[in-house]
Amino acid sequence: MSIIVQKFGGTSVGSVEKIQNVASRILEEKNRGNDVVVVVSAMGKTTDALVGMAREITSRPSKREMDMLLSTGEQVTISLLTMALIQAGQEAISYTGWQAGIETESVHSNARIINIHTEKMTAQLESGKVVIVAGFQGMTPSGEITTLGRGGSDTTAVAIAAALKADRCDIYTDVDGVYSSDPRYIKGARKLPSISYDEMLELANLGAGVLHPRAVEFAKNYQIPLEVRSSLEKVEGTYIEEEASMEQNLVVRGVAFEDEIVRVTVFGLGNALTGLSSVFTTLARNHLNVDIIIQSQTDKDTTNLSFSIKEHDLEEALSVLEKNQDELGFTHIEHERDLAKVSIVGSGMISNPGVAAEMFEVLAQNDIIVKMVSTSEIKVSAVVDQVNMQKAAGVLHTAFKLDAVKVEEVTL
Amino acid sequence: MSIIVQKFGGTSVGSVEKIQNVASRILEEKNRGNDVVVVVSAMGKTTDALVGMAREITSRPSKREMDMLLSTGEQVTISLLTMALIQAGQEAISYTGWQAGIETESVHSNARIINIHTEKMTAQLESGKVVIVAGFQGMTPSGEITTLGRGGSDTTAVAIAAALKADRCDIYTDVDGVYSSDPRYIKGARKLPSISYDEMLELANLGAGVLHPRAVEFAKNYQIPLEVRSSLEKVEGTYIEEEASMEQNLVVRGVAFEDEIVRVTVFGLGNALTGLSSVFTTLARNHLNVDIIIQSQTDKDTTNLSFSIKEHDLEEALSVLEKNQDELGFTHIEHERDLAKVSIVGSGMISNPGVAAEMFEVLAQNDIIVKMVSTSEIKVSAVVDQVNMQKAAGVLHTAFKLDAVKVEEVTL
């Protein structure tokens, strides 16, 4: 008997009717003879509504209290979904994050899972029940409720799959798979039948949005095969596994993009040796995620540092740095808003030098100025003006031959 | 330094604005130099909305899953109220029922508190924080979320007051005290300055609705002085304490009434000796609350039994009894709907015989037929047709001189 973990996102459980639809998808899997654990998010716009109430009270809500507030969203979904399964004649039981044994570090609003105590879930599966778990949430060893950050339900699902040694983890969502780029913006974007963990990881980190990056990391580390598929249509989705089995000939597999990027530049760091680490240690201590980092030495005594950060973290980042100006020893800070990041991803890049050069050439031919660059073995990211984001993604998608040309459509 | 427990009901926290108002009431108490623990219910119509969603899915939702669902309501309130206090500069922390150490028996939807582990609350009070606790909910020793039944937030508040040896427990509500009868229906009903636990207990049990009976029981057992007062107006409420200090001369202190009563009659119980206990053991085992019980022996071998029950428990009571017909040994069951219970309460009755007789005479003079009767040392209840309920309460209120005649209104 196989263990299958299924994850349904907020759109998939957005109404009572949709919850009943999800129940029937779960039953199909259970009736195939598998043990099923289901992870769900909050219903549709619930999280936004809760955030809205908090904002009416304060512009800077306590992170602990936000976790307390937001974690109610999934708790509503798990109980309703469990009722729907019981109503359909299938024994089921709901667990909040803490009841399911999901232990996290003691950080609010963005905690990482450190352990999953599976005893309860295993006992319920053995008794024939479907186990419905609240995604996105966990508990610290001292009994505090934490959340994993937006998209954390994916992480919950994959982490449970790893802990239970599940055979597969299916991520049901409102799109039917992973695309070569976002089809809402890029004409010709097409669904990929499969993709490797590393490629997906780069795409997830780059804002492709289908899957939470931490979830992909977990899946890669524990070798959990994922399938991203539609909760509405019964069609094949995209498999994510160790080696993408098809289309090895494509150097670039996808183009991702992300807006609301800000470039922050710290000028005149006195100590070139320790300046870099102390700035980023200070930011990390405040749980501010920095993306691209560029260091430049203007003369032998002072260093300038640029980094990119999400718009919503800007205010806190500036305030943290300014508070520590004396200790960090810089002269002043500047920032540039309204930027975006466009990235090409593909494991074929490792054996194909010159991909970055080709990317920059394509952007230059289209009069798009590159402001920051970051590369890994399987991706190249360029920061451009936000107004150029969609255009940049489109021309790269075409240049790297990602436009859909299905075999059956080829006419001679 | 005193410890004060405050409880705010659903209407008092029905909107973000009202939550901010509650925060300022808490601050007033805290600023008097007291340690404050606050117990809150779900916001306004939240519980009804959650029940509505469950009903869309199933007509008989699992009680465990209902507890899972409903307990989210208070969790939303505690986090928002805590944010409001922090925003106002007062350190505060929210706790769900399980975090606050509220341990209950393993019964869903109507659990009783069996213990309160106060370590966390005490530590937070000592650090100067206001502690905000979700009412109405607790946790079983095995980690299941339970609820205490409607009105259970009162019980949470009083139980916490007892466990922390609080100096007072203030029940803030949308009325400004305990009345001699329900002023919405009975002209001349007036606010009582004080009332004894026993009188309040009878009133609470009789459906006066201001305070949950279990809460009053707890308060009596642990001698916690209660004050029922308005969350909106700053006026004196009603004190509930061991001996009502005023108006000892009044024999009857209040008139309570309650609709949706059904009389069930079980005919032909074969075994007069064990029939009574076995019927009610069967009902109790299914957590069905029976109120008035009347037994009559028609001949020496068979017994008929009548009992009153709330309308919403009727279906389950009938099904439970019919399922056990062979074992219980009765011939058939009948029931009569659309009844109501009207009761007079007052500790002065103990030393005033003839109060019950006077009650029946008043009802008879007004052509109101009494269908069942129940008495205790300090109350007399009569079951009447529901259409007569309000009239019965009104004539009794007048007959026992409960109509308001304020001293300043007396003209000579």
Image (spheres, coloured by chain):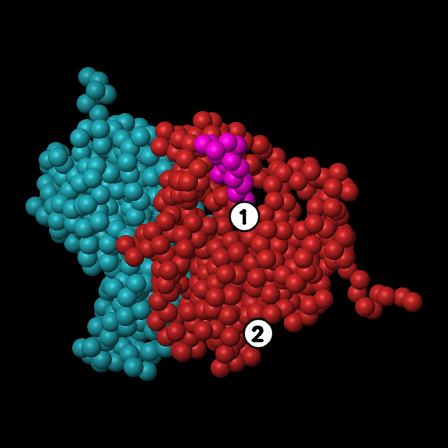
Chain colours: A red, B cyan
Quarter assignment of residue A191: bottom right
Q: Is residue B290 left or right of residue A114?
A: left
Q: Is residue A400 left or right of residue B136?
A: right
**Which residue appears at 37% of the width and 60% of the height?**
A114
Among numbered discs 1 and 2, the one appearing first in the sequence: 2
Residue bearing the label numbered 2: A28
Looking at the rendering, the stretch of residues picked out in magenta corresponds to: A292-316
Question: What subunit carries mark 1?
Answer: A
**Residue B254 position within the rendered picture, expressed as x and y whole percent measured from the top left:** 22, 41
**Which residue appears at 24% of the width and 78% of the height?**
B302
Crowd tier of the residue under label 2, counting other residues whose Cα lies within 10 Å: few below 14, some 14–19, many 20 or above = few
Amino acid type assigned to the residue bearing label 2 in the image: Glu
**Which residue appears at 23% of the width and 69% of the height?**
B296
Amino acid type assigned to the residue bearing label 1 in the image: Lys
**Residue B247 position within the rendered picture, expressed as x and y whole percent measured from the top left:** 13, 34
Q: Give how far apart the Cα atoms at labels 1 and 2 are.
A: 27 Å
Q: Is residue B371 visible?
A: no
The label shown at residue A366 is: none
Residue bearing the label numbered 1: A45
